Image: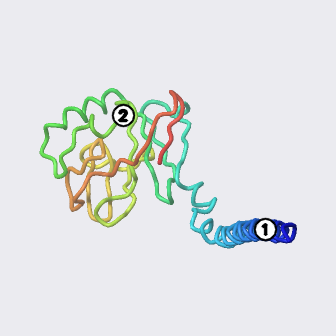
């Protein structure tokens, strides 16, 4: 009879450990299945490749000569990149003390004085100001002019005259090296 009691104990211990193992294994497989089913939904919340591609723009500034401006697109909007001359830098610094609608110093709007990078959208009604191309009217202050309602911007992109309430915006940007700038 002692043999029978020992066999029953072994079977009971063996049955409990087997049951515990099966419960643990089933739970693990179930958790992996739930995670596998949820992942596509979570992953669909990530930005798509085309959105990520538009989030930043790199510009090779080595080909932009002093006094020249280029327009690039960032997030579907024009961005003005101007290689300013010494006279434009000097004028912008002098205009720091002028009567400004939206007060900002030129030094607060640029990282390097010779490079001015602005969002090319008028802050009045969203038009694209003129002044980027040779022959474009630059307005009364040598910067940009929005012909829709007559906003005049200076050589630092600050509003000087007209209905625009704010300066041309400065997008986030960083110089990667002396020849490349990353916007966004």
Residue 38 horizontal side relative to residue 107, left or right? right
**Which SS class for mark 2?**
loop
Q: Position of residue 31 (x, y in %)?
A: 67, 69
Q: CA distance from mark 1 to mark 2?
A: 80 Å
Which quadrant holds residue 116? top left
Q: Which mark is residue 165?
A: none
Mark 1: give few (<14), some (14-19) or many (20+) Cα within 10 Å: few
Q: At 28% from the left edge and 63% from the top edge, which residue is drawn?
A: 124
Residue 45 horizontal side relative to residue 142, left or right? right
Residue sitting nearer the eye, 49 or 6: 6
Q: Quadrant of the N terminus?
A: bottom right
Residue sitting nearer the eye, 115 or 23: 23
Residue sitting nearer the eye, 61 or 176: 176
Q: Position of residue 2 (x, y in %)?
A: 84, 67
Number of numbered markers: 2
**Disc nearest the viewer among 1 and 2:** 1
Which quadrant holds residue 117? top left
Which quadrant holds residue 68? top left
Q: Position of residue 133 (x, y in %)?
A: 45, 47
> Which comes sooner in the sequence, label 1 or label 2?
1
Against 9, is 74 above or below? Answer: above
**Which SS class for mark 1?**
helix
| Residues at marks 1 and 2 touching, judged by CB atoms closer than 8 Å | no
Mark 2: give few (<14), some (14-19) or many (20+) Cα within 10 Å: some
Q: At 27% from the left edge and 34% from the top edge, which residue is drawn?
A: 107
Residue picked out by circle 1: 9
Against 103, is 42 above or below? Answer: below
Residue picked out by circle 2: 111
């Amino acid at each position: 009879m002692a043999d029978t009691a020992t066999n029953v104990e072994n079977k009971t211990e063996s049955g409990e450990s087997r049951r515990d193992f099966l419960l643990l294994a089933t739970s693990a497989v179930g958790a992996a299945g739930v995670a596998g089913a949820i992942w596509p939904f979570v992953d669909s919340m990530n930005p798509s490749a085309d959105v990520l591609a538009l989030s930043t723009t790199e510009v090779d500034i080595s080909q932009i000569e002093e006094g020249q401006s280029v327009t690039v697109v960032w997030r579907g909007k024009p961005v003005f990149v101007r290689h300013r001359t010494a006279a434009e830098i000097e004028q912008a610094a002098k205009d720091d003390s002028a009567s400004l609608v939206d007060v900002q110093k030129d030094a607060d709007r640029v990282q390097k004085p010779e490079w001015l990078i602005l969002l090319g959208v008028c802050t009045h009604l969203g038009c694209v100001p003129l002044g980027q191309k040779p022959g474009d009217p630059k307005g009364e202050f040598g910067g940009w002019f929005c012909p829709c309602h007559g906003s005049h911007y200076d050589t630092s992109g600050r509003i000087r005259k007209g209905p625009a309430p704010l300066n041309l915006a400065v997008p986030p940007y960083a110089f990667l090296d002396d020849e490349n700038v990353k916007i966004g």
